[in-house]
Image: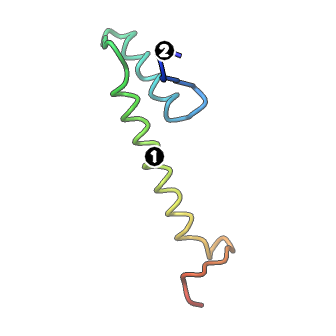
Amino acid sequence: MLSNGTVRSWAAPATAVGLALTNTLHAVGFHRRRGGSVLSVTRLIGLLVAAGFTFWLLWHAEERGWCVPWRSR
């Protein structure tokens, strides 16, 4: 725990990418006090990828043999 109420874990893929990117930027000389903005961007990208994948799965549900109640047969 870095501070009160802040937990950053490598267990979440988007957070892991953000932490790795923050550490890499720090290693090459881009120093910031906190990596919060990089983490926020990578978490947002992770959320958008998850939402896109969810919609893709729903769109291709019939091809996968899933019951789709909102489409007529």
- Residue 55 place in picture, x, y as percent: 49, 63
Mark 1 secondary-structure assignment: helix
* Cα distance in 3D space between marks 1 and 2: 23 Å
Relative to residue 29, is residue 72 depicted above or below? below
Disc 2 residue type (three-letter): Leu
Could you say which quadrant of the image residue 35 lies in? top left
Q: For mark 2, what is the residue? A: 2
Residue 19 in the image: x percent, y percent?
47, 23
| Residue 14 placement (x, y as % from top left) | 49, 35
Residue furthest right in the image: 65
Q: Judging from the image, what secondary structure is the residue with disc 2 in?
A: loop
Q: Residue at x 44, y 37 (%)?
A: 43
> Residue at label 1?
47
**Please, is residue 50 above or below residue 25 in the view?**
below
Q: Residue at x 56, y 70 (%)?
A: 60
Q: Residue extending furthest bottom?
A: 73
The residue located at (67%, 73%) in the rendering is: 66
Please identify the quadrant where the C terminus is shown. Answer: bottom right
> Which tag is nearer the camera, tag 1 or tag 2?
2
Q: Are marks 1 and 2 in contact (CB under 8 Å)?
A: no
Q: Position of residue 63 (x, y in %)?
A: 63, 74
Disc 1 marks a residue whose amino acid type is Leu
Residue 43 against residue 53 in the figure, above or below: above
